[in-house]
Amino acid sequence: MIAALMVSCLAGCRGDGSGSIAVIPRTSGTVPWEPENVGAQSAAAELGERVYWNASTREDDIDGQISLVSRMRPGMYKGLVLAPDHALALITPVRRALASGLPIVIVGSPLAIPAGGNLTYVLNDEEEGGRLAAARVAALLHGKGTVALLGVDPDIAGILARAESFERHLAAEQPKVTIVVRRLGTFNYAHEQEAVETVLREHPDLNVIVALSSTATRGAISAIDSSPHRQAVRVIGFDPESLPFGSACLDAMIVQDSRGMGDRAIRLLHARFKGEPFPPSILLRPLLVTRETVGSVAVREMLYTRWRPGYTDLRRSATP
């Protein structure tokens, strides 16, 4: 059954989305994707475009996202910005939308469709994300220790790329640091927490958990917080739903620049409407966030989620 869909139409877009640029993130209401709305809405207001923002309420509602994309046609919408939930399931609806003549920008994680014509990509630099995680592990372990790599998801190409990058950089820079377990991930929080509890029991000498997804990150933090004798284990997470630095085990988060993705995607589509060609792809660097930097201007600007028309001075806002 398709889950209920959350609709947020801002900046004067009509309920049917007619004449708007449709923006479909992976999910709504979380740190990874609400800033995309800010970037898209701000760029649209500047350029005289309108945004129709619509998202499934769960990241595992792949059918819901397919249903949304399947409704995208020229005449109803001017263009589409999509952060796909699944590397394979979204290929067919995206190809159908392209065949109808709709310009599309894929953000976050790629699909196995080559860029060109009416398709381009604004992607998270997963190579850099993996490198940042490996460098952070090196700073924590000083050359020797054990790591669990959790949340590997073969259905999201970007997560596989960040896992490969992390392992490659760690092996090159810290050959005495051992990855003792690699686990596939799911979108089920309870399952991820149970998986981490198992890892903690089976590896009592574990030093660091690198959690490659928001669900794995949340599961790791909850499992460690509920195990007082394992508080020494540190977590480096990706794509957090929030920034829970109140938890002692959380060392760092690596966050996509989804706000920049939203901004860049709207600008690319606006140029495309005027006949300009799409670039093949654009990479945006993620940001390493720690408890020391979470209140910085750079982090506040990247993660700002409370856009409203006419308000652009993010440095005067509260922390996200």
Image: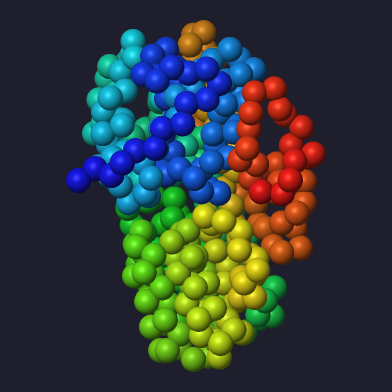
Q: Residue 48 is drawn in which quadrant?
A: top right
Find the residue positioned furthest to the right: 316
111 over 212 or under it: above or below: above
Residue at 42%, 81% (x, y): give it.
Answer: 197
268 over 123 or under it: above or below: above
Q: In this rendered view, identify the residue nearer to me: 305 or 23.
A: 305
At which x and y percent is residue 185?
Answer: 36, 64
At which x and y percent is residue 23?
Answer: 44, 29
202 over 36 or under it: above or below: below
At which x and y percent is residue 98?
Answer: 31, 22
Q: How is the image coloured?
A: rainbow
Q: In this rendered view, identify the residue nearer to me: 69 or 114.
A: 69
Residue at 42%, 77% (x, y): give it.
Answer: 196
* Side of 147 relative to 3 (left or right): right
Q: Is residue 111 at all visible to an observer of this figure?
A: no
| Count of numbered circles in the view | 0
Find the residue positioned furthest to the top: 274
193 over 145 or under it: above or below: above
At which x and y percent is residue 46?
Answer: 64, 17
Q: Residue 251 is drawn in which quadrant?
A: bottom right
Residue at 71%, 27% (x, y): give it.
Answer: 311
Residue at 45%, 85% (x, y): give it.
Answer: 200
Q: Is residue 132 at all visible to an observer of this figure?
A: yes
* Side of 247 relative to 12 (left or right): right
Q: In this rendered view, identify the residue nearer to me: 141 or 316.
A: 316
